[in-house]
Each structure stands twice: as C-alpha cells, then as structure tokens.
Image (cartoon, rainbow, N blue to C red):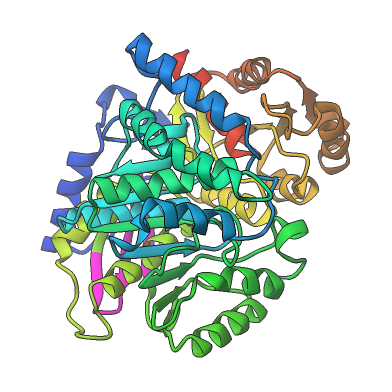
C-alpha cells in the first residue's frame, strides 16, 4: 500500500523547516519500506501511532487483572449503554453523596454525532502541551475499559481504576437503594471519572457525552466551553429523526454564559443550537466564520494544516491523522482550547505556535483510519453511521493509493446499515461481512442480505467469525501480490474495530 507523497511545492520557509523536523521526530520512517510503484517513489504507511500504542493492554500482574475482571463483571450486571431511562436524577444523586466532585475543576463538554472522541483527544493534547493537568472521559472504548478515563493524556492504570470503583461503590449502592432504577453501567463509569479527576486533581476535564446531551449522564457538569461536532442521524430512536430534533437534545450541554464552539452543521441543526445559545446568553464561535481550516494537504503519515483560530492563523501544523474530517476536528479543538484560555473574549493574541504544533503532532486517535498492519496494509475505522462512513471513505481516497480495497464489516443491528454500506461501496472491491462478540452485533446472514443488494452477490463473502473474516480479507488482498497496493478496511462498529485491533496486533 502506498501513501500519496507530500506536495513538492512547499515554500522554502522556516515554518516548513520546522514541519520537516516535526515529521522527522514523530514518524519512524524505515527506508526499507520505500518501494518503487508505478514509476513514482512512495512510502508505505506507518503501522500504528508514532509514539507507541495509546491503547492499554490487560494488566501483567495476575492479581490486578483478576481484580479488574471482577469490576468489569460487576459493571456488566447493570444496564448497558443502549438501555437507559432518560434522566440525570440518578447521576445527580450520586454526585451529591460524593460531595459534587465534578464542581472542583472547569470542564470542556463535547457533544455531536461524529468526531467527538478524536476532538476530545486533540483538546487533551493541546491542554497538556500548555502544562495543564487534564482528565479525559470518552466512550466507548476500543479495547480496554480503562481507556475511557484518562489522566495526564494516558489511560488510568488498572490499579487506580479498581481503587476508584471500590471507593465509590458504597455510594453507588446507597443511590441504587433510593432510586426506581439502579445506576447504569455508563452512569457508574461517569461517577468514577468525575471522582478520579477530583482526586488527581486535574486542572481541566475534557468530557464527551455518551448520547445526546440534555439527559446524558455527563450533563451534571457546567462546561465553560461547550463543543458541538457535526450532527447527523444516529440513535434516531432516542434523539429524534431529523438533525434539528437531535440538535435539540444535544443543545442541553450549552450552559448559562458558556462559550459554544460549533463545527459545521446542517442548517436546521445550526438554527436550534444558535437559539439555545441565545437563551443561555452564551458566546458562539462558528466554524467557517470565526475559525476554520484555511488549507490542508496530504503529507506522509497524516496531513499539513493551516488553521484559523479565534486569535489568528496557525501555519505548518502537522496532524498525524487522515481525512478532511480530522482537519475540521483539529480546527474545532483549537478553537475550544483558545476559548478556554479566554482568546476571543478577553484578548485576541494566538496561542504559542510551537506548542500548538507539538500538541497536534503527538495526537493519536485509535480506530480512526488507523493503520495497524502492512503487507497488505490493514486500516481500522470505527465508522458506524452513514456520515462517519462517508468521511472515512473520502479520507481513504485522499490519503491512500490502494489499487484494490477489501472491506471487513461487522455492524450493530440498530444502525443504518444500508446507508453505511452504500457510503463504502464505491471504494470497496469486495466485502467480507462478519460479526463481533456482542449481542448487539447484526447477524452476518442478515448483514449479507443487505450487502448483496448494495454490492451484488459476487462481491460479498460471509464469515461469521471475525478472525476468519480478517484472514479471508487479507488473503483476498494478497492475491494482487506484495507490491500491488491492495489493502483491507475493517469497519462498521467500534467494537468490531477494537476486537480486530486486538487480533491483528497480537498476530
């Protein structure tokens, strides 16, 4: 597989010299991977993030692993993340008995349909680069439950995760006894995150909603900055059937006097969000108006950006992530951090450009157009709705020179699977449909029936087991030969991607 080389018409400037240094420091380039293909010099994609794997593995200590498994088992007896009773009553009761830990630090609250986790990671990187101690709460996890709670830019260690759970468990049981419904899996984890952040203590929390906004368990914080990433149709049974209805639920994170950072939105969604901002006397910064992406070009291992923030332009920013959608996420993250520091309201000077460059260059987002293996190249993307699939497909077209791409798709039954497959159809030569290990996973035969309608019977392979599906896809890709440029895309669900990531990185 080959990546498109960076443009050769860069101006000879100090900024681009700095960029070359960042690329050299952040990308472990092996000259043996350079190949001659179709008469042009290319470089195969990196396998994995440049600074080691940001996803934790099971604890090496058997006792710690046993304790973690016991906690995971206890949490699994609670309502899962797709079963909920829309209310913040239970989480508010838990916060009350814990002494309101979420009030002990300022917060940046992130909602939207797609891009929340990547944006949260970028915000975390920026704040950390400016020497603030951060706590990040995101969901779902790719491989390990401990990924959801991060301190200082790294997942909380297993021992601390277990200790935090044991610390709040008596209070959780106290709240359970006084409520009609027990606290859910997500509500308990949210309580753990807020308690862990207070205990650290952190200077700022970066919090991603689980679903929606108004009644989401995370919405017991008063985020001084509210971020809304692009809204599209997802969770329509819970949030509404139009972007405007979904925006109405997500607007609940906009608090009185906050600063609202709005990514580009459908017109009807933007109207709802702006109305809520007016009602809350909030200050609004809109992508494409007050901030945005000035320019971007494909570079080895990612892309080179010029971003316009609230305080000015930031040139020569290397982002080691693929796709236009990640460039837009970067613009949103930068504006959110500027707003947190008072830029645009109290003063207009930009953030230190070198610090911004270092922060973005160190960003990783596992399972988002992530290369985990080469020969053939295997890319993971957690797209699970049509908008996410469209963004991923465009990113692959732009950043990778695949001559033939095989898809491995395992999706959840409650998603718009047809829309997802239709978005990927133009870039996939063949598709292997499969399932992940969860009950929510769509039956492979049912998925195959839809895939045949979209792709045609001759382009669809069914492999119920994910490991068999990966092997089948890699075999199909290898048929073109080592240097032919074929690849594999694993997608359809965060869970599918996480399980595939574990299988591939062990292999």
Residue 493: in magenta span:
no
Instruction: Give the answer, above or below, for where 160 lies relative to 86.
Output: above
Q: Nearer the viewer, residue 75 or 316?
A: 75
Q: Position of residue 275 (x, y in %)?
A: 57, 87
**Is residue 484 visible in the rendered structure shown here?**
no
> Could you tell me which residue is drawn at 38 percent across and 83 percent down?
290
Q: Is residue 4 above or below residue 391?
A: above
Q: Is residue 38 left or right of residue 340?
A: right
Point out the residue furthest to the left here: 14
101 or 55: nearer the viewer: 101
The segment highlighted magenta reads 293-315
Q: Residue at x 35, y 27 (%)?
A: 158
Q: Is 466 situated left or right of 283 in this image?
A: right
Q: Is residue 279 above or below residue 426?
A: below
**Number of numbered callouts drawn:** 0
Q: Position of residue 47 (x, y in %)?
A: 39, 29
Q: Give coordinates of residue 73: x percent, y percent.
A: 56, 24
Using the image, determine if residue 338 lies above or below residue 299. below
Taking the magenta stretch, the answer to whether it contains residue 306 is: yes
- State whether the magenta stretch is mostly helix, strand or loop: strand
Q: Residue at x 49, y 29 (%)?
A: 143
- Residue 432 quadrant: top right
Where residue 27 appears, as percent x and y from the top left, is: 26, 37
């Amino acid at each position: 597989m080959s990546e498109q080389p960076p443009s050769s018409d860069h101006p000879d400037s100090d900024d681009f010299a700095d960029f070359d240094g960042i690329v050299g420091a952040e990308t472990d380039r092996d000259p043996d991977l350079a190949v001659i293909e179709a008469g042009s010099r290319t470089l195969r994609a990196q396998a994995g993030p440049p600074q080691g794997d940001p996803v934790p593995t099971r604890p090496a200590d058997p006792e710690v692993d046993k304790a973690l498994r016991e906690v995971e088992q206890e949490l699994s007896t609670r309502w899962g993340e797709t079963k909920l009773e829309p209310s913040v009553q239970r989480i508010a009761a838990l916060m009350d008995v814990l002494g309101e830990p979420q009030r002990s630090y300022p917060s940046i609250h992130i909602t939207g349909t797609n891009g929340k986790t990547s944006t949260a990671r970028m915000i975390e990187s920026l704040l950390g680069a400016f020497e603030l101690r951060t706590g990040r709460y995101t969901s779902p996890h790719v491989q390990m439950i401990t990924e959801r709670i991060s301190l200082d830019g790294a997942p909380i260690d297993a021992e601390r995760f277990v200790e935090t759970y044991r610390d709040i468990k008596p209070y959780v049981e106290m709240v359970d006894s006084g409520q009609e419904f027990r606290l859910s899996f997500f509500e308990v984890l949210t309580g753990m995150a807020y308690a862990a952040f207070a205990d650290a203590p952190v200077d700022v929390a970066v919090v991603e909603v689980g679903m929606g906004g108004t009644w989401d368990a995370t919405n017991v914080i008063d985020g001084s900055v509210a971020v809304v990433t692009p809204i599209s149709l997802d969770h329509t049974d819970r949030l509404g059937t139009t972007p405007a209805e979904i925006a109405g639920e997500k607007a609940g994170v906009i608090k009185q006097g906050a600063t609202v950072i709005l990514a580009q939105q459908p017109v009807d969604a933007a109207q709802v969000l702006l109305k809520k901002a007016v009602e809350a006397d909030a200050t609004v910064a809109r992508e494409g108006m007050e901030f945005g992406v000035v320019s971007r070009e494909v570079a080895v291992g990612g892309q080179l950006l010029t971003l316009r923030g609230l305080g000015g332009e930031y040139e020569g920013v290397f982002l080691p992530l693929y796709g236009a959608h990640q460039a837009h996420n970067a613009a949103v993250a930068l504006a959110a951090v500027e707003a947190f520091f008072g830029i645009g309201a109290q003063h207009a000077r930009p953030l230190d450009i070198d610090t911004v460059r270092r922060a973005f260059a160190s960003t990783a987002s596992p399972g988002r157009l992530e290369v985990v293996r080469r020969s053939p190249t295997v890319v993971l993307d957690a797209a699970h709705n049509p908008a996410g699939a469209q963004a991923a497909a465009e990113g692959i077209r732009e950043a990778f020179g695949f001559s033939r791409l095989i898809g491995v798709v395992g999706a959840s039954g409650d998603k718009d699977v047809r829309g997802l497959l239709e978005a990927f159809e133009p870039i996939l030569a063949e598709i292997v449909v499969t399932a992940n290990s969860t009950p929510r996973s769509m039956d492979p035969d049912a998925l195959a029936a839809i895939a045949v309608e979209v792709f045609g019977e001759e382009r669809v392979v069914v492999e119920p087991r994910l490991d068999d599906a990966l092997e089948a896809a890699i075999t199909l890709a290898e048929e073109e030969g080592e240097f032919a440029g074929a690849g594999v895309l694993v997608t359809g669900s965060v869970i599918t991607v996480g399980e595939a990531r574990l299988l591939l990185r062990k292999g």
